[in-house]
């Protein structure tokens, strides 16, 4: 039966006790990791969030205490007081391995059934089972460490921005639904039947209004919500380090962002980042890596074969070039043993699945050169391609041709990532960089409209203003992303503050003045009362932690995450509600 604490008060955490405490009387509390009964000798490993310490009981221990120790089982909650002494058999694998507590007072504070899985580091238990019992999963040392490190990241974040003059301002969780790119989570209003709040996809509009209000440096560790399909680096609710600055240009925002990353890497990982961070324009990133969030820790860059292939005997290549397209390729070094014909067939299926017509290849083996298109090429043409690729024995060249170069670049970008994974390419250093000069518009093939690539409040580059209406495809934005190891960590921009330009951009995005005012009238009105030039960014806290802690999934850095279908297994939500609750809201289910 569980006992009350009474006069027992914790003096130390389990993982903090060391040789300096020898001879001291201490009191610890936690969960039983393991109990070892050796007859008159009993040892218990007691665990809390800081680590494990060994409790010792022998034939001099009071009988009632010895009996409690004997009855203790895995995950029982204990309070133990006693004297710290040197261990006779030391454990070098844990920080407390040189000492133990000889227990003189023991209380069983909570009993436990046998847990559904063992509470150990790096558990190989089915993740769904662990998520169902997430409160037990969080006791595991590796996961508990992630949550505590996340707390430290949040603290360093607040300290850094406070030291740089930022004010933390909370923005509402129940807001007006406005088009921001993803599907809103909607909340029906009981007081206003037929009307809905939305949960914020970001604090975007409110932080801009904070600039109009005169709080020239805003930050918030903000909860955000997007009703979209999930993946390893996406959750329906997520946390964003949000910031906005007045009286700034892009360089000022990037400098604050770089300073923050330097501080985080130093305090969390002990790594000194070299500043300034590398930068690529969107165009450079796409042409070299086929992605606007490239992993630059390895090479395998895209190169252009159009000058060679445009006049060659292989019609797939020459036809693509004559139709205004191009022929592009990547080289996988020392991969010929991994990228067999069978594996290349799988890669061909992969690129066809993302819209490519096929995949041409050259393998440079010890026996010579083999290729999927050699019979259509002269020896000189084949050698020219190999020379352009700077390829040697053991390398594989993978080639895609199409009349649409943008499609080729995206396809090769995805192929580059797939090949890197298959070949286990070495990734060196930290792949942290800025991507700048994004297109303002992107063409939506489904609707035939031009949409904003970031959001409609992003300012276009000044030199693009004269041809906004004439050449949307060429308009570049004062937008920037921060990328870490192939993951988009942050997105931001300098904002439009001129009401006339803002209306002009809305019109170009297919919104009439009336429609724009209906959706964003409060912001447009605010800009009439003296809006300072401003810009900002939002840094994904979950994604940042996932990368810093070298985790495979966001679920490893979030205490109570959702799974692929946006449900939470522990509480079984979402769940039906009583009809009476729907009646109050005027909602009837189909």
Image (spheres, rainbow, N blue to C red):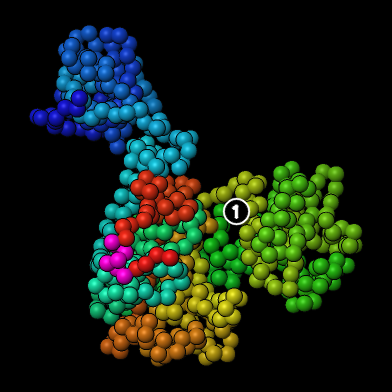
Front one among 357 and 327 = 357
Q: Is residue 583 magenta?
A: yes
Residue 468 in view of the camera: yes
Up/down of 136 relative to 563, above or below: above
x then y, percent, for residue 454: 47, 73
x then y, percent, for residue 191: 24, 72
Q: Main secondary structure of the magenta part?
A: helix
Judge from the rendering whether residue 251 lies leftward or rightward of residue 33; answer left or right: right
Does dot 1 land on a helix, a strand or a loop? Answer: loop
The N terminus - image quarter = top left
Q: Quadrant of residue 240?
A: bottom left
Magenta-tinted stretch: 580-586
Residue at position x 31%, y 83% in the image: 522
The C terminus - image quarter = bottom left
x then y, percent, for residue 111: 26, 28
Residue at position x 34%, y 23% in the image: 34
- Residue located beneath label 1 in the image: 298
Up/down of 2 relative to 367, above or below: above
Q: Quadrant of residue 247?
A: bottom left
Residue 394 in view of the camera: no
Q: Residues within 10 Å of mark 1 (few under 14, many from 20)?
A: some
Front one among 504 and 1 = 1
Most distant residue in the left direction: 7
Q: Is residue 588 magenta?
A: no
Q: Quadrant of residue 219?
A: bottom left
x then y, percent, for residue 125: 47, 35
Residue at position x 37%, y 85% in the image: 518
Judge from the rendering whether residue 220 lies leftward or rightward of residue 120; answer left or right: left
Exactly how many numbered labels are in the figure? 1
Up/down of 125 relative to 311, above or below: above
């Amino acid at each position: 039966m569980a006992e009350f604490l009474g006069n027992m008060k914790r003096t130390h955490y389990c993982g903090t006790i060391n040789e300096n405490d020898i001879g001291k009387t201490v009191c610890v509390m936690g969960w039983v990791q393991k109990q070892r009964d050796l007859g008159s000798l009993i040892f218990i490993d007691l665990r809390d969030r800081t680590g494990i310490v060994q409790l010792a009981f022998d034939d001099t221990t009071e009988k009632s205490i010895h009996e409690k120790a004997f009855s203790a089982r895995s995950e029982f909650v204990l309070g133990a007081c006693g004297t710290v002494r040197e261990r006779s058999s030391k454990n070098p694998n844990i920080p407390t391995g040189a000492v133990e507590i000889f227990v003189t007072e023991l209380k069983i504070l909570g009993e436990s059934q046998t847990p559904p899985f063992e509470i150990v580091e790096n558990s190989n238990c089915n993740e769904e089972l662990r998520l169902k019992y997430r409160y037990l999963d969080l006791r595991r040392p590796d996961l508990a460490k992630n949550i505590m490190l996340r707390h430290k990241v949040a603290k360093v974040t607040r300290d850094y921005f406070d030291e740089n003059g930022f004010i933390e301002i909370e923005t509402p969780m129940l807001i007006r639904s406005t088009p921001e790119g993803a599907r809103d989570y909607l909340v029906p209003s009981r007081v206003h039947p037929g009307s809905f709040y939305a949960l914020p996809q970001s604090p975007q509009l409110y932080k801009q209004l904070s600039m109009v209000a005169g709080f020239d440096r805003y930050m918030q560790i903000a909860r955000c919500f997007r009703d979209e399909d999930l993946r390893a680096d996406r959750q329906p609710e997520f946390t964003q380090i949000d910031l906005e600055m007045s009286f700034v240009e892009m360089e000022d925002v990037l400098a604050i962002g770089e300073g923050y990353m330097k501080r985080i890497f130093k305090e969390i990982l002990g790594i000194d980042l070299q500043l300034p961070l590398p930068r690529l324009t969107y165009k450079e990133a796409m042409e070299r890596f086929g992605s606007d969030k490239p992993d630059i820790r390895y090479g395998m860059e895209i190169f252009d074969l159009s000058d060679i292939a445009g006049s060659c005997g292989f019609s797939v290549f020459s036809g693509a070039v004559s139709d205004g397209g191009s022929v592009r390729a990547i080289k996988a070094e020392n991969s010929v043993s991994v990228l067999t014909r069978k594996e290349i067939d799988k890669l061909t299926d992969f690129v066809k699945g993302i819209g490519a017509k096929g995949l041409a290849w050259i393998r440079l083996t010890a026996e010579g050169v083999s290729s999927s298109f050699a019979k259509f090429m002269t020896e000189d043409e084949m050698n020219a391609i190999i020379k352009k690729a700077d390829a040697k024995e053991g390398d594989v060249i993978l080639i895609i041709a199409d009349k649409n170069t943008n499609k080729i670049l995206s396809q090769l970008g995805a192929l580059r990532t797939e090949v890197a994974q298959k070949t286990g390419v070495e990734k060196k250093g930290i792949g942290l960089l800025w991507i700048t000069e994004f297109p303002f518009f992107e063409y939506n093939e489904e609707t035939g409209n031009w949409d904003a690539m970031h959001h409609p409040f992003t300012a276009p580059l000044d030199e693009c203003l004269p041809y906004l209406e004439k050449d949307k495809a060429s308009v570049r934005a004062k937008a920037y992303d921060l990328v870490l190891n192939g993951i988009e960590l942050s997105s931001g921009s300098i904002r439009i503050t001129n009401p006339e330009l803002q209306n002009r951009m809305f019109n170009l995005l297919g919104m009439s003045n009336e429609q724009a005012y209906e959706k964003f009238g409060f912001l447009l009105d605010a800009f009439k009362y003296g809006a300072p030039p401003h810009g900002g960014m939002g840094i994904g806290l979950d994604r940042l932690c996932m990368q810093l802690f070298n985790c495979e999934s966001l679920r490893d850095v979030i205490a109570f995450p959702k799974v692929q279908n946006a449900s939470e297994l522990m509480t079984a939500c979402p769940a039906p509600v009583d009809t009476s609750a729907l009646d109050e809201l005027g909602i009837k289910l189909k």
